[in-house]
Image (cartoon, grey):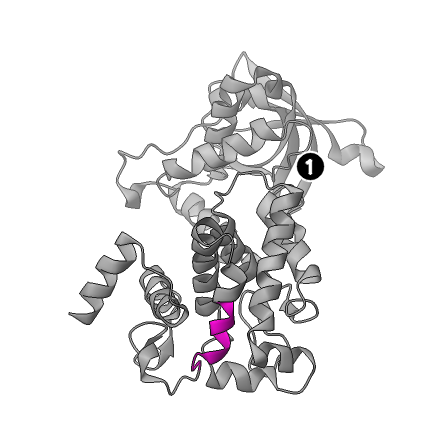
Amino acid sequence: MPDSEFYHSFPAIRGVQAGKPCYIAMCPMRIIPTLFKFDEEEVPVELRAQRAINKSRIPEISAYLTDNPKGYTLSSLTASVNAAVNFKPLGNTGSGQNMGTLLIPMDAQILINDGQHRRAAIEQAMKDNPELGYDNISVLFFSDEGLERSQQMFSDLNKHAVRPSDSISTLYDLRDALSDLARFLSKDVDAFSGMTEMEKSSISNRSSKLFTLSSIKNASKALLRKSNRDLISEKEKLIAAEFWNHVTENMPDWVKAKNKKALTYELREQYVHAHAVALQSMGNIGADLLSHYQSDWQEKLKGLSKIDWSRQNKSWEGRALVHGRLSKARTNVLLTGNYIKKCLGIALSDVEDQLEKEFKA
């Protein structure tokens, strides 16, 4: 029994990692802010067991919870307890000996080793929707073995974490309107259908694909001038598909690749138009065309077929190319778009005009 007269009690399952007991419990979210402490930022980093909280991440996670109260998913928190805990099993044999009640002294310090942003977001989300406090989150408890062990735990928990690619996140995100748009376009636009890398955000040298799903998403986001959480109507989806199909009609190399009359890896090696920087630029240009050239934007796109898209064209240097290498940095996307606009006879915006002057200077 814990030395404390008062204790937290959780239904839990006992397990073993690295020869030491650990416990996983389902905790009501309403107690998370008060139960779990965070190594405060004013403590020097070498004396903490956690990184400093990035406060800009909290609103995003909090909004995710409040926007999806019936459909969110949160992974487990990992915490260390700096006091002796007691586990009361349901039985002495079989599965019952590892299922029971975990007792943690109320005066124990429980430090989060992994999940401090989730903890802070839960606290924020419950202010907007108190009902979330009745939900649960799983917590993996370890006994605290000191600062060095806690620091090592943080390192071990994070060193092997790999963020999924933007493309596969787009493919699987069924809530996000922009992801839905990208999936729609990858099937409905002739040059994208069968030519889109759905899993990776970069294309391998010998791949038969020409575009990535993430680049289609980002370019179409610019085309429709949408922000991340904006809704997209069916009409807007059809407009985007019409635009990209007209672009395709005026990109002979895209059509050849689609019809297997050109090798995609050779297009990537030799031409600018087979890369995300050109696709993103076309999304930006498309937004202007749809806004200012509503009656003849299709005619304007016919000039695409007359552009020299070859990497050997020195006009791309400093724009799509930096010392011969493709760059999709924002400045390069805009400068690439400036050149394309010039070829199509489209006026530059004030921002683009200023950037062009600086580039030429």
302 in magenta: yes
Seen in the picture, residue 185 relative to 80 is either above or below; the reply is below
Location of residue 216 in the rendering, given as x and y in whole percent from the top left corner? 56, 60
To which quarter of the image does residue 96 belong?
Answer: top right
- Viewer-closest of 284 and 299: 299
Main secondary structure of the magenta stretch:
helix
Q: Quadrant of the C terminus?
A: bottom left
**Visible residue check, residue 165:** no
Farthest left residue in view: 361
Question: Which residues fall within the magenta stretch?
Answer: 301-309
Farthest right residue in view: 94
Farthest top residue in view: 5
Location of residue 61 in the rendering, given as x and y in whole percent from the top left corner? 51, 35
Q: Residues within 10 Å of mark 1 (few under 14, many from 20)?
A: many
Location of residue 165 in the rendering, given as x and y in whole percent from the top left corner? 55, 59
Three-letter code for the amino acid on which mark 1 is drawn: Arg
**Residue drawn at point x = 51 percent, y = 65 percent:** 299
Q: Which residue is mark 1?
A: 14
